[in-house]
Image (cartoon, grey):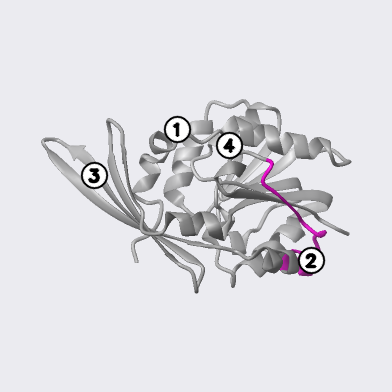
Amino acid sequence: MMDAYQSLSGFYDSLTTDIPYEAFADYYESVFQQHPGEFRMLLDLCCGTGTLTRILARRGYEMIAADASEEMLMQAREKCADLAMPPLFLCQEAAELDLYGTVDAAVCSLDGMNYLSPEELPEVFHRLHLFIRPGGLLIFDIRSPESFAALDGGIWVDETEEVFCLWRSEFDPEEKIMYYDMDLFSPEGELWKRQQEEHIEYAHDPEFLKQELRKAGFSEPVFTDQAPQGDQGRRFVISIREE
């Protein structure tokens, strides 16, 4: 299988200029304000190229950022190198998360949890419970099954000065799995270089998420679409790390 986010990492930011990262940060801060306790040390799980990590760091938060892709982390480190207090970047699989201490909250944005299979999620929630302080928050977003189904069979083209991206989607409603195939064409002298990637996302059932969060020691989660990109099928999940 072609690995995700190897070839794409260098083009990801230029292909995703429509993502409202500042709105995501605003939303997280609004949730923090609704809960007691101090929120200073944050984990950005599945941080990607670190755009949100950088925004939160510039707002004064101490950041730990983890991602399984070395290529994406290289972009993130470079992006945050000029900060007075650069984030701590960790190349770790979510199910193998291992921090040096606790954080006040963990966020996981833009389908990060959808990239984790249902078999992985119980361990991911267990690891997050270990490293979020009691009373701290876990906030992540997921794509609804309906939003995945709406993309089934679609073919899209994204183009910038540095890359031409053709991607196709196929949704398996029985397995609740979305497959994306990407072809990336970038100029190399007088020729074009073609690179390919395959991405797989899982449409998680809300009842399953509730069950596994409770098993891991989190509170009954709140699901809401009154948040960034909620009108596009993105649902945010908020849960408290219990004692």
Is 194 in front, or is 76?
Answer: 194
Q: Is 175 positioned to the left or the right of 71 in the image?
A: right
User: What secondary structure is found at the residue carrying circle 3?
Assistant: strand
Which circle marks residue 185 in the picture? Answer: 3
Please tell me in which quadrant of the rendered image residue 215 appears.
bottom right
Which circle marks residue 3 in the picture? Answer: none
The residues tagged by marks 3 and 1 sit, at their Cα atoms, a distance apart of 19 Å
Please tell me in which quadrant of the rendered image residue 52 appears.
top right
- Find out whether residue 223 is within the magenta segment: yes
Q: Which residue is mark 2?
A: 214
Image position, residue 172 (x, y; %):
44, 69
The residues tagged by marks 3 and 4 sit, at their Cα atoms, a distance apart of 27 Å
Disc 4 marks a residue whose amino acid type is Leu
Q: Is 241 positioned to the left or the right of 237 in the image?
A: right
The residues tagged by marks 2 and 1 sit, at their Cα atoms, a distance apart of 36 Å
In the image, the segment drawn in magenta is: 212-226
User: What secondary structure is found at the residue carrying circle 1?
Assistant: loop
- The residue carrying pointer 2 sits among few (fewer than 14), some (14 to 19) or many (20 or more) residues within 10 Å by Cα, namely some
Q: Are marks 2 and 3 in contact (CB under 8 Å)?
A: no
The residues tagged by marks 2 and 3 sit, at their Cα atoms, a distance apart of 45 Å
